[in-house]
Amino acid sequence: MGLLPKVLKPSAGEILFEGRDVLKLSEAEHSGLRGNHMGMIFQEPMSALNPCYTVGDQIEEVFKAHTTLSKTERRERTMALLKEVRLPEPERLYHAYPHQLSGGQRQRIVIAIALAMEPRLLIADEPTTALDVTTQAQILDMFKALKESRKAGILFVTHDFDVVAEIADRVVVMQKGVVVEQGSVEQVLNNPRHPYTRMLIDAVPKRHGGKGNPKMSAPIALRVAGIEKTFSTARTFFKPARKVQAVKPTDFTVLEGQTLGIVGESGSGKTTLVRCLMGLVEPDEGSIWIGNDRLDTRTAAGRRNFRKHIQIVFQDPYGSLNPRRTIGDLLVEGPVNSGVPRKQAMEKARELMRIVRLEEDVLDRYPVQFSGGQRQRISIARALMVEPKILIADEAVSALDVSVQKDVLKLLDDIRKSVGLTVIFITHDLRVAAEISDHILVMSKGEVVEYGAVDDIFGNPQHSYTRQLLAAMPGRGWEAPNMAALSAADATR
């Protein structure tokens, strides 16, 4: 795409596109290539779209830059693109702004922009990472349809092997800037040869988990009884105010030392439920008990004091840590604000660094000096500083590659076992939910539609929505091969 600064441009080799070496093109020639012949789809559509312009304006901008089409013709082409990427109500979305759309809709808009000039090559950089499983399935189906209808090549960058199995014809595996293995999707995924490829595939969570039937004899850590929450939308000139029931009457319990996985599409009510559990939103009805203490009847000050018993690890390890403060300052902030002497809090921080498998000198450094996986370990340590009874992990591994994801999941599970921590794990990745959870709670449109042990939910789902989620999992049924068996077979050759 020619988007790197000059100091980072390749010093050797060639990149041939339709017979031309793009490394030898001038900036003007490269600019003509981008958009016209190559289209780029970025990972985060909210960052790729201008929040100040409507969807229609942003798609039409491509036609303004590369064609002499009239305003009427640009609008017609834009409407056709909105229909091609399977967006409902294209007329309404044409006038909408990015913040008014869902994540899946924004990603479709970015795809429409990339398709505007009918490029011969589409480069998709992690385009489904932040999407729930059903939206992801729709986007992948759309990519496959576009490949057939447009006859375009697709370069699909991802860390998700299920997505690779679903969409790819050939696979290239890279490690530290080097191609270590390449071949057909069947060859690389089912019989990998390089140790790094084997390590990556071995880190893929199994579809049906591996924890077995959970013990049911522990005391209750969390009990939710009949909570519900309704929000009122603001009245506008065009629309009257209306009520949206974000969480319908919900009941469930979690035992001490267990992990509950909460899964569902975007908009299913997972976030509102978590905000109720954290005491950030007061439910309209029902009760929330942590042990023998009732949370929802406490005053605002009481809820703040009680919040140390239930902590959260957020999805984005880059956005949840203040870049201007050292790791030590970030970790001791909670205990110090609660009256713990700073020296004592720093001792606790050093102990937690060992628990999350980081060196003590981490405490004197800044977030920018760490990788995503290291930052997520730091976020876990910060949440554990106040010794909570319950830890909520909100999409805590969705931004991490598969090997780092495996390490963080194992870390969470080891901590859970060692200190008897109760974990509530919110995720849209069903493999991850199966890997780490004892029980699964499935939400749809604010309602708990199914709740049970992992083996029951994945092996014999009762609700049609649960079956729909499982059917939407990418990968065409691919399951990671047994790496130990492959290595043993190699040794006998």
Image (tube, rainbow, N blue to C red):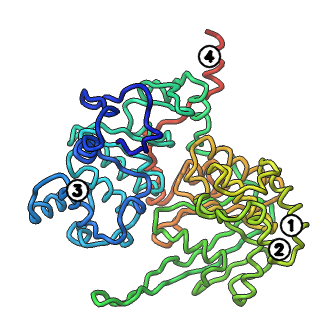
- Residue in the image at 73% along x and 76% along y: 307
Q: How many marks?
A: 4
In the rendered structure, which amino acid carries the disc numbered 4? Ala
Q: SS at mark 1?
A: helix
Q: Mark 4 or mark 2: name the one nearer the start of the chain.
A: 2
Classify 10 Å Cα crowding around label 2: few (below 14), some (14-19), many (20 and above): some
Q: Position of residue 111 (x, y in %)?
A: 31, 53
Say the numbered circle drawn on residue 345.
1
Q: Is residue 132 left or right of residue 148?
A: right
| Mark-to-mark CA distance, 2 and 3 | 53 Å
Q: Position of residue 172 (x, y in %)?
A: 45, 30
Dot 1 and dot 2 residues touching (CB under 8 Å): yes
| Mark-to-mark CA distance, 4 and 2 | 56 Å
- Residue in the image at 59% along x and 83% along y: 283
| Mark-to-mark CA distance, 4 and 1 | 52 Å
Give the labeled residue for mark 4. Answer: 489
- Residue in the image at 78% along x and 57% along y: 364
Give the labeled residue for mark 3. Answer: 62
Q: SS at mark 2?
A: helix
Give the labeled residue for mark 2. Answer: 336
Q: Mark 3 or mark 1: name the one nearer the start of the chain.
A: 3
In the rendered structure, which amino acid carries the disc numbered 2? Val
In the rendered structure, which amino acid carries the disc numbered 1? Ala
Dot 2 and dot 3 residues touching (CB under 8 Å): no
Q: SS at mark 3?
A: helix
| Mark-to-mark CA distance, 4 and 3 | 54 Å
Q: SS at mark 4?
A: helix
